[in-house]
């Protein structure tokens, strides 16, 4: 699913890994970067965050499949997992 999501972002002219390049972009715009921190949160299926992830995936299901990277079965399996309370996933965040 992650590859399909990245592929869809690129098809929309977006950079799916913009976060890691953000500090350098800000510095080139003359911002003073004092600190950059990254976090990786673990999220249990069925949680509020997982529910948002599921809603987003449902809304973009056809677009992810259209990338040719994920099948409808892949998307369905992902959705099933984000609803299971015994499944955990990671969400990375970068702060500058």
Image (cartoon, helix red, strand yellow):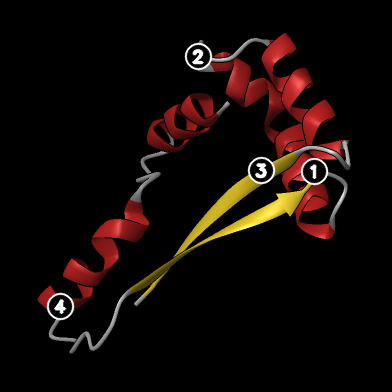
Quarter of the image that includes the N terminus: top right
Q: Is residue 25 above or below residue 27?
A: above
Q: Name the residue under label 2.
A: 69
Quarter of the image that includes the C terminus: bottom left
For residue 24, the mark is none
Q: In this view, does 44 lie above or below 23?
A: above
Q: Distance between the residues labelled 2 and 1?
A: 20 Å
As rendered, which of 36 and 86 lies closer to the eye? Answer: 86
Q: Name the residue under label 4.
A: 27
Q: Residue at x 11, y 74 (%)?
A: 28
Residue 52 relative to residue 15: left or right: right
- Secondary-structure class at tag 3: strand
Q: How crowded is mark 3: few (under 14 residues within 10 Å), some or many (20 or more)?
A: few
Q: Distance between the residues labelled 4 and 3?
A: 32 Å
Q: Distance between the residues labelled 3 and 1?
A: 16 Å
Residue 17 relative to residue 60: left or right: left
Q: Mark 1 points at which residue?
A: 55
- Secondary-structure class at tag 4: helix
- The reply to whether dot 1 and dot 4 touch (C-beta < 8 Å) is no
Q: Is residue 70 above or below residue 94?
A: above
Q: How far apart are marks 1 and 4 (CA)?
A: 35 Å
Q: How far apart are marks 2 and 4 (CA)?
A: 35 Å
């Amino acid at each position: 699913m992650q590859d399909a999501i990245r592929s869809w972002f690129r098809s929309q002219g977006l950079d799916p890994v913009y976060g890691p390049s953000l500090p350098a972009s800000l510095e080139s715009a003359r911002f003073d970067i004092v600190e950059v921190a990254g976090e990786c949160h673990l999220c249990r299926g069925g949680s509020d965050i997982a529910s948002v992830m599921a809603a987003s995936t449902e809304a973009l299901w056809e677009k992810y499949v259209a990338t040719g990277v994920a099948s409808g079965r892949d998307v369905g399996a992902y959705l099933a997992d984000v609803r299971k309370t015994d499944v955990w996933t990671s969400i990375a965040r970068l702060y500058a």
